Image: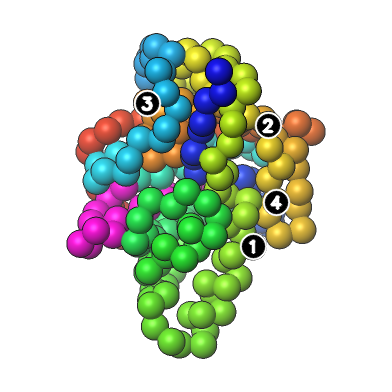
Amino acid sequence: MMKRAVVLMCLAGVSCAPSINPQMQQATDALLASVKAGHDLAAPAAYEPMPWEVGQWVLLKITDSKQQPSIQRVSVVGREGEALWVETETQDYYRHTLSKVLYAKMPRTPQEAVEAMQKMVSKTDDQPQEVFDFTSNDPGTRLTKNLMKSFAQGVVVAAVDAEQVEDATVPAGTFRGCAKVAAKAVVGPVSKDTTSWFHPAVPVNGSVKGLSNDGEWTVELLDFGLTGAQSKL
């Protein structure tokens, strides 16, 4: 029987930098060593994604072609009316970044992901925050949102038919009966064939594991929770 999987998936990597920041390397390695999740989830009866609720979070490890890790926490951290704030915190051997986006609704396609964006707040290391109001008519803000349209094609996986299910074991634990999906991810000029494993009991984006078929990057779930997420911005 064909099953449906609707998830957000981030094709990410560690950006180039002149040199490793020893403090960031130590902090990143310490966080990876501290993760001690042990989830064991049964196979789901259906593959629809979990609706977003304030407090949900996932913690992911992303490994690039140099085998350097980055850690990404994606959390639902607040609500404004019917809209929801989703915050992404990323740290690697070079920097620490925070980005919080207000979505009018939980997006199901790349186009929806862009059109649903109402505001964004971002910060890198100790630099000042940048704030964008996508509901304004400011030309610079409109340009920023338009530039994100092409990026959204690579970070959102639309509804697909999962022709295959498979158990997946990652640092977060064992997830039985994951939907195993092959897709092509496109971010700007970069296009990669990918394989991903999704489980609907995982909040925010359902992501358990992902890899590019050329071995350039991998994504693994470190832990997740349904409550407790708080904004750092």
Judge whether 16 appears above or below 131 on screen.
Answer: above
| Element carrying mark 3 | loop
Q: Quickly name the residue at label 1.
A: 150
Q: Looking at the picture, how far across and down is residue 228, in whole percent? A: 22, 38
* Badge 4 element: strand
Secondary structure of the residue carrying tag 1 is helix
On the image, numbered disc 2 is attached to which residue?
Answer: 182
Q: Is disc 2 in contact with disc 4, using a CB cutoff of under 8 Å?
A: no
Q: Which residues are magenta?
A: 76-93
- The mark nearer the N terminus, 3 or 4, is 4
- Residue bearing the label numbered 4: 186
Q: CA distance from mark 3 to mark 4?
A: 26 Å
Question: In the rendered structure, are the residues bearing label 3 and label 4 in contact, judged by CB atoms less than 8 Å apart?
Answer: no
Image point (24%, 58%), residue name:
82
Marks 3 and 2, Cα distance to the nearest angstrom?
Answer: 20 Å
At label 3, the amino acid type is Ala
